[in-house]
Amino acid sequence: MFPPREDLLRLAPELVLCASGILLMLVEPFLGRARRGTLLFLATTGAALALAATLLPATHQGTAFSGLLSVDGLSVFMHVVVGLVALLVVLGSADYLDREHIQHGEYYALVLFATAGMGVMSSAAELMTAFVGLEVSSISTYILAGYRRDSPRSDESAMKYFLLGSFATAFFLYGIAMVYGATGSTQLGHAALTSFPGAPTLLRLGLALILVGLGFKVAAAPFQVWTPDVYEGAPTPVTALMSSGPKAAAFALLLRILATTDAAGSFWFWALWISAVLTMFVGNFAALAQTSVKRMLAYSSIAHAGYIMVALAAAAAADQVALGVAAVLYYLAVYALMKLGAFMMVAQLGGASERHVEIDDLAGLASRQPAAAACFSLFLLSLLGLPVTAGFLGKFYIFNAALASHLIWLAVLLALNSVLASFYYLRVIVVMYMREPNQDWAPSPMPWAVTLVLVAAAAGTLYLGLFPGRVMGFATQAALSLPLH
Amino acid sequence: MAQSHLLSLLIFLPLAGVVALLLVRSDDETWIRRVALAIALVEFALSLLLLRGFSAGSTAYQFEEMHDWIPAPPVHYHLGVDGISLFLVLLTTFLVPVAMLASWKSIQQRTQGFFITLLVLETGMVGVFLSLDLILFFLFWEAMLIPMYFLIGIWGHERRVYAALKFILYTMIGSILMLVAMVWLYELSGTFDLPRIQAMLTTGQLTLSLRTELLLFGAFFLAFAIKVPLFPLHTWLPDAHTEAPTAGSVVLAGVLLKMGTYGMVRFCVPLFPEAAHRLAPYIAVLAIIGIIYGALVALVQTDLKRMVAYSSVSHLGFVVLGIFAFTPTAIQGALYQMLNHGVSTGALFVLVGTLYDRRHTHLIREYGGLATPMPVLAALYLFVSLSSAGLPMLNGFVGEFLILAGTFERHAIWASFAALGVIFSSLYLLWAYQRVFFGSVTQERNRTLPDLDLRERSVLFAMAALILWMGIGSAGFTRRTETSARNIIDLMRRPQLYNARSAAVPQPGSLGTGAR
């Protein structure tokens, strides 16, 4: 039986992504190494088409495939975010792949498949579907993490990510089983789940395991231990993808479960509160001690997961769900842009085999490549949350959500963490601007594709920092599209 | 009144100037300097237009501009100027060209970056004084940190990186908590618009419990007290000042420190009067400790620039004391002293900078008997020192007198202790002067130092003229600040507290509630 047309329209971005991925793998053997440009063109077109195809679900909202997918504001918003991430990652990877002598076709295909998985995660209205999306995205990224086969660190990264990630998905799956056992349904909007009287132990246990599984995916403490090694070992463009895309999709899934499952909100609230505080402090304190930019950024993404958890806790506090959800979404968009920009910068400046990813390697960048230094500073300042950049408004909305839910302490702790974070972000700026350049090594000039990606990320960072109205409007609509309890 | 765009122009002209500077070739240093100076001078000329259109008798914000910016939560691009901010804007636009001229020759590296940084800084500073929306204010307040950080960190002296980092971290700790307080205030009032919140508070539409008020006051006050800096939060200041290039010190002392006291007058006192009243004695004690401690530490410095830096701690203590005495006279004095300090200390830093340009040291013992080779510099230095020490006829006297007189009305003891600071200030300033300029020339190479050149003279004579004018013609300034200073006291009254508080607030300026 062929699915109805409406259902296919609602799945259009995933279909485009998968089709482009398969096409890439099919044509690669027929193209010689000299025709890498064609592969890049195909992959970029695929990602761009998928991004454009988001218009279809956006104009045909509703449920699809007998309620397995719910294509609503949240799903559309997240599709735009992960689609944009995929496009930028594909575009930004080409020169890196050349430099490291990595096969292009499969790499691009995996990025596109991973993105399709993230898309499914963000619109899944049923837990098993969510699991399928999670696995598609995870397995693709496991492979991508190990893509520099001849580098032991990359192998280590892939192995760690795979082992620990499998554990996490097992938890997630076990949690689904328990929820099913307790309520007789895996449907998120199901009556048994939304208005379950008293939430028995089995349901609570199931929800707890689901939280553990997704907590791992977003790198929330105490499930964050894998992050620095995996992020550091993986090829940097892949790190850029991992730190923005899957994290955003996992948060979207958390949001949907939180918003549609009555028991989850009150049950998760304290877990989220404590985990948020832990995540922020663990991430920031560890980042303070790093000497490698890449590892420092890895720890900083843990800290940022903590900031987002603050907004999540605000949503779970049930006073102002929509405010919290909108803050999470806005921050996810902001975070994806600035983190992707920062990692892409590291990928470019790191040079061959990523030998130069220490903070000291950036010495004097400002006098050698002033534009690159300014751009990197912009990303760092945005991660730090200074005004005029997107990071500031993202944090501002989180503060707003937290205080609207009367989480004053959480807001204060978030504030203190921002100050803590300024130590290590500013240190990088100090090295770039206030040190003499290294004599024995200089970064190579920017290729045009990377320049394009960086300019796009920087422009987005500024746009979201100065004119948040539109995107925040979408985020709010997305929040209101959820059947909030 | 038809909406005027003068304030937006003042904020964004320097930013437009940055674009102009980027168009100049980066190795063409002469033209970079000229273009930057031209922009700064045009900005100053434009800011003088504020004086013409400003009506002194009104408590309302003038030249108001209001546009929507962020829809939800509603943040507006709301600008306005009143008697409190008027002269601070003028001070800023005056000191930026001064800072540029003072570093005309001493900045030889990355000249383009230096002037761009100064212009961005100017946008931030002017924006802080003109913003009437809490978030807009915060935006300028924080955005300004980065150019200042670069200014100290790139063009500063030996320990510049340490000083820059210390400066930015101190400031951020305070300001991020202020952001939390601002958002909290929004949750209570439903708006970020300062005049609206003020009106809601004065009409009793919004009441804060004492605990809330104390917490909010604390968060705002901490941010401002660090910036002032109030004892014991002052330790970043000597480092930042000593390591900053001359332009950085001038702007830092002249304008940035004023942002702290401005914030106290604009936010802390009128928004949270009950908390302000309860905490005033403690704050006053800290201010007095700052006055005396700053002066004593300045006395024992061996480094000229560090001495001037500590003198700032002492002088700003006066300003804080004046604000928290809660009398119109003292607040007027505080406003006046903010301007005085900007001009006098700015001039002192320029003078010390001219010495540094010649000898590359700030150490007092390296100098001695300089009056012989450099009579003009010596004369100007004496003049500025005396103004800073509060000699009658010069500007410092007016401010200190108003503060002490206003404080004495209600707190004779505070005023008596603070008066000690006046004595000490002449002590450290004149003693340093004596060691640097009097006697015979102690070091042979100082004998041939060139006196001030035309550029240095024009800057310093302009500042000296201003010092003299502010000392004699102070009425022209106080006339414009008076209404606003009184208004601060009026705004502190709350309907529900009126009976309890009326005894404690003397001379309500008018019988109206002060609500607009």
Image (cartoon, rainbow, N blue to C red):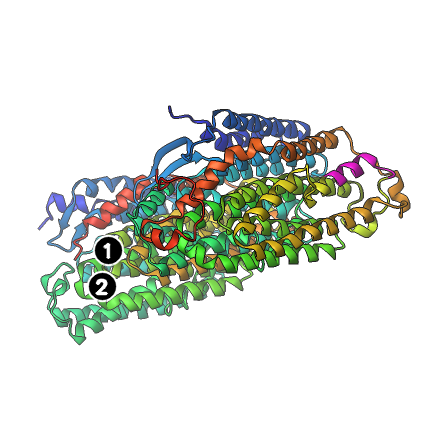
Splitting the image into 4 quarters, where does residue A145 fall? bottom left
Q: Which mark is residue A265?
A: 2
Residue A145 sits inside the magenta stretch: no
Viewer-nearest residue: B487 or A55: B487
Q: Is residue B476 visible?
A: yes
Residue A453 % position (x, y): 43, 42
Splitting the image into 4 quarters, where does residue B169 fall? bottom right
Splitting the image into 4 quarters, where does residue B192 fall? top left
Q: CA distance from mark 2 to mark 1?
A: 10 Å
Viewer-nearest residue: A251 or A398: A398
- Mark 2 and mark 1, same subunit? yes
Q: Is residue A244 left or right of residue B294?
A: left
The residue tagged with tag 1: helix, strand or loop? helix
Host chain of mark 1: A
- Magenta region, mostly helix, strand or loop? helix
Q: Residue at x 38, y 36 (%)?
A: B77
Q: Are marks 2 and 1 in contact (CB under 8 Å)?
A: yes
The residue tagged with tag 2: helix, strand or loop? helix
Q: Is residue B257 visible?
A: no
Q: Is residue B424 left or right of residue B224?
A: right
Q: Which residues are magenta?
A: B372-383
Residue B439 % position (x, y): 88, 46
Location of mark 1 (residue): A321
Q: Is residue A149 above or below residue B10?
A: below
Q: Which mark is residue A359?
A: none
Residue B236 % position (x, y): 60, 55
Which circle's residue, 2 or 1, is located before the other in the chain?
A: 2
Looking at numbered disc 1 in the image, what kind of residue is underneath it?
Answer: Val
Looking at numbered disc 2 in the image, what kind of residue is underneath it?
Answer: Gly
Residue B53 % position (x, y): 47, 25
